[in-house]
Image (spheres, rainbow, N blue to C red):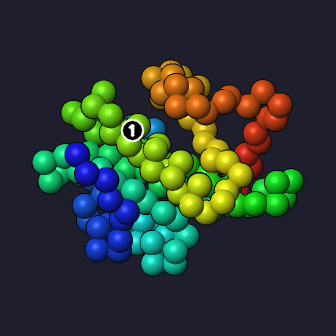
Amino acid sequence: MKLFTAQLQDVQKILPLYLGYRAFYQVDESPEKAEKFLTERMRNHESVIYFVEKDGMPVGFAQLYPLFCSLEMKRIWLLYDLFVAPEARKEGVAQMLLARADQLATETDSAFIMLSTATDNVRAQALYEKEGYVRDTQFFVYNKMVS
């Protein structure tokens, strides 16, 4: 398996994984909008996307967004998307992606990586905790839909 940093020309390669991720979370896949979304994030340097190939086929990806922590006065990374194709699960793909996210945080002198996952996604929770992520018990997260 090989890990790559996605470039603009890789959008078509990772698009099926992104659509699978959206389907996993029961969101309309919207292929045209999804392609445009990924393209814009990359073109505008608004995210970093890593993907893993096995036998030349993309089998997993992670997308991180840069943020800043006013308290730490440093950059932080939001690991918003992580998806591994069903046929490649339990083969170390997610661990490779998480390790590369850790490396990015180190390279950019970041305070931490934050992520969230569905409350019923216990497999992902177990992986994150195994990889050193700690569930936040001090803060509640609130969302307000605006559209």
Tell me the kind of residue under disc 1. Ala
Q: Is residue 3 visible?
A: yes
> Helix or strand or loop: what does disc 1 sit on?
helix
Q: Is residue 18 visible?
A: no
Q: Position of residue 78 (x, y in %)?
A: 61, 52
The C terminus lies in quadrant: bottom right
User: Does 139 sit above or below residue 147?
Assistant: above
In the depicted view, which residue is nearer to us: 101 or 27? 101
**94 or 11, nearer to the observer:** 94
Q: Is residue 34 above or below residue 45?
A: above
Residue 20, horizontal then vertical, whole percent: 33, 45
Total label count? 1
Left or right position of 79 against 93: right
Q: Is residue 54 left or right of residue 49?
A: left
Q: Along the horizontal axis of the image, is 107 left or right of 32?
A: right
Is 65 on the left-hand or right-hand side of 99? right
The residue shown at (35%, 71%) is: 7
Image quadrant assignment for residue 91: top left
Residue at (33, 39) in percent of width and height:
93
Residue assigned mark 1: 94
Q: Position of residue 112 (x, y in %)?
A: 67, 48
- The residue drawn where x is 82% and y is 35% is 139
Which residue lies most toward the left here?
55
Q: Residue at x 86, y 53 (%)?
A: 71
The residue most toward the bottom is: 43
**Mark 1 neighbour class, 10 Å CA radius: few under 14, some 14 to 19, many 20 or more:** many
Q: Nearer the viewer, residue 100 or 44?
A: 100
